[in-house]
Every structure is written in structure tokens, then in C-alpha cells.
Amino acid sequence: MNQTLLAIRGGEALFPDGPPAWPILDEDVLTSVRETMADGSWGKYDGRWTDSLLAQVSKLSGREHVLLCSSGTIAVEIALRAVDVQPASEVILAAYDFPGNFRAIEAVGACPVIVDVLPSGWVIDPVEVESAISPATSAVIVSHLHGQIADCERLKKICLESNIVLIEDACQMPGASFASQPIGSLGDVAVYSFGGSKLLTAGRGGALVTGNPDYYQRAKIFCNRGNEAFPLSQLQAAALVPQFEKLQARGIIRRQNARALIEATADIAILKGIQQAESDSGSVADYHELPWLLDDVRSNWPRADFIKAIQAEGVAIDVGYRGFTRRGVRRCRQHGALIQSRVAAQQTLVLHHPILLESDAAIGKVAEAFAKVANSES
């Protein structure tokens, strides 16, 4: 493989210094962090910066009730407990999704029910959700993934008709919208992540939002163990607050560059399945990761080798999620053949988002790296 890579590269990598760093070293973030260090509030969980962050998240989501917490992963579990998911009940989620969502369902004692994603895509198929509902179903988790926005309008209708709760995972897409409504406002409860790779980052952290005061109160009660068991600190909040002012402007740049890369790679035969997330009227996506599907049937490249070859050019690309299609019946109920989820798990490539804030020339180099590797297959 090393000789193959050397032959492909033909000398220096296109990005000899490697991919762009994330997070970006913003001066206003440094200023706010220095302020909370100087006034001694950095070790506290309540104060000026968390109050400001609560207001920013409420504005972003259009939801009145906001609970800050230590990660997006724990926020999903808190959401399940907030809507009173009971042990032995069922919670539906996509068979291709972030692994923490599956484990959160297990953590509350419920049974995950996995359903397929849309064809050539990465988000849950509402038709499969509707047919998977049983008398034991209590909730559905819907994730917006890889720049694709799930059809929450249809999912809300399905859940309402079946008297079940919709939990929206907006961890990859803060600031996006569906049918002119903010992502995070579409579920009965929604969660955000401020993890190290996220578009809004404090290295770690998350938030739960809802318009239902009973869900909010139940979430707070679960988190309070004499103190806050899953807190987000003033120091983290201080790092986050200035980033909200840049989120929309950076989102515009990411979308423009994502479209440019989709178009630039459209003629590469072994790549397929690109669906632009903002194709629906009034929907605006953002990209934590830009995805492709590698057509293994038409390519002589195993996916791992294809990724290594592009990484050798200094491009931050990797596999997507493994998904849950191999989980046994003791851990979940599988609904249907899950064909599209298997394709997503086996063929997805994802480009990390920092490059999407770079220049046109850098975007051109990424497209060149794809073409260079694809054209070199034997």
C-alpha cells in the first residue's frame, strides 16, 4: 500500500501542512476566556456566561426552555428521561446513526428499534418509521446528518397521530433550518453538541431545548443530584458565546464550498449518492461533514485504501458511522432489510468541515485530490 500511495502522490501532497486546524483561534473567544479567568468565574456553573449562552441557544432554537449539560451524548439520554421513556418500551432510530444515540436508549432500559435511512442518503426514512411503530413505541430519535436534513414535518405528523414523542438530534447542524423553521425547534425535545469537532465548540458540552415545561422540569430533576451532575462551566460558555455571532456567516461559506465540491466531483464515476440538503423550499443546511458514497462495485479501491490515499494528500476525510445493522436481537429490534443503512455504513466517506471555510483554491485542491486518487486506480 505504501508504494501505491507514493505512486499516486507523485511527489508532495497537495496539502503538505495537513488539513486546517479546528477550532479556529478567534480573538474574541480568547478575550472572553481571559475575562472569565481574570474575574474568577471560570470554575463556576452559573453566572454571566452561562446566562448569555442560555439566551443564545434559546434564540437559535426558538425554544423557551434550555438546559446546558456536559455533552450532546448525555443530552440525548436526558431527553429520553425528560419525555418519560419507560424501561421495556421501544424507541425508533435510524440504523445508520451516531452510536451514542443507541446507547442512550439502552441506558434508560428501553429497546432500540432500528429502521432504514433514505436511499442514497443518511437520514431516517419516515415511511420506515411509520411502519415500525408498535404498541410499545414511546419515542423516535431523528438525526440530521452529514448535511442532510430529515423530514421532521412528516415525522411530527406520524408521531402526533401515534401519540409518541419526537426527539431531534441537531448536534451536527446548529443554525440550519427546515421549511423556514430552526433545526432544534422541530422535535418535542432537541439536543445540541458543543464537542471538539462541532460547528460550535467548547471542546465538550451540550444543550437540551424544549417548549414543554414539564419535559424541562423532569430533565432538571434528573440532573440534580444535590448539585448539577452534568454541568457546562462558565469557562466553556465563555468560549462558546462569541461563536454564535459567526455561525450564520460561516454557514454561508460552508454551503457555497460544499456545493462547489459536489459539482467538482460529480463526474467521478466511483462516487455517487450526493444529495444537496437544502433542495427543499425554505430549508438551509450546514455541514459538520460533507459526505460521498464510494461505489465499491465500480471501483477497484477498498474504501480504507481510497481514504488513506486521499489522506496522504493532506485532506481530512474518513469513514462515516458503522451503524447498527450488525446488532443482535438481544440488543434491538430490526425493522425491514435495512439495505440503505448497510450501504451507508459500508460506502460513506466524510470530509471534515474546517476545509469548507478555506479559499476557492483550497477547495479546488480537494477536488483535485479526489480526481487524482480516483484516476489512479488500477
Image (cartoon, rainbow, N blue to C red):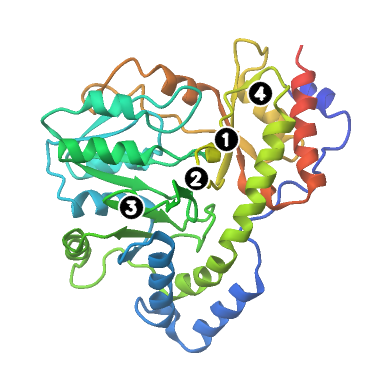
Q: CA distance from mark 3 to mark 1?
A: 23 Å
Residue to which mark 4 is pinned = 305
Q: Quadrant of residue 308?
A: top right
- Say which mark, if any, is on residue 283: 2
As helix, strand or loop, the secondary structure at mark 3 comes to strand
Image depth: mark 2 or mark 4 in front: 2
Observer-nearest of 137 and 240: 137
The residue depicted at 47 percent of the width and 74 percent of the height is: 235
Rendered-image quadrant of the N terminus:
top right
Q: Amino acid at mark 4?
A: Asp
The residue depicted at 79 percent of the width and 45 percent of the height is: 362
Q: CA distance from mark 1 to mark 2?
A: 11 Å
Examine the rendering and report whether any part of residue 160 can be seen: yes
Precedes in sequence: disc 4 or disc 3: 3
Q: Amino acid at mark 2?
A: Ser
Residue to which mark 1 is pinned = 276
Precedes in sequence: disc 1 or disc 2: 1
The residue depicted at 70 percent of the width and 26 percent of the height is: 266
The 10 Å Cα crowd at callout 3, few under 14, some 14 to 19, many 20 or more, is many
Q: Quadrant of residue 311?
A: top right
Q: Are marks 3 and 1 in contact (CB under 8 Å)?
A: no
Precedes in sequence: disc 2 or disc 4: 2
Image depth: mark 1 or mark 2 in front: 2
Residue 3 as seen in the image, left or right of residue 114: right
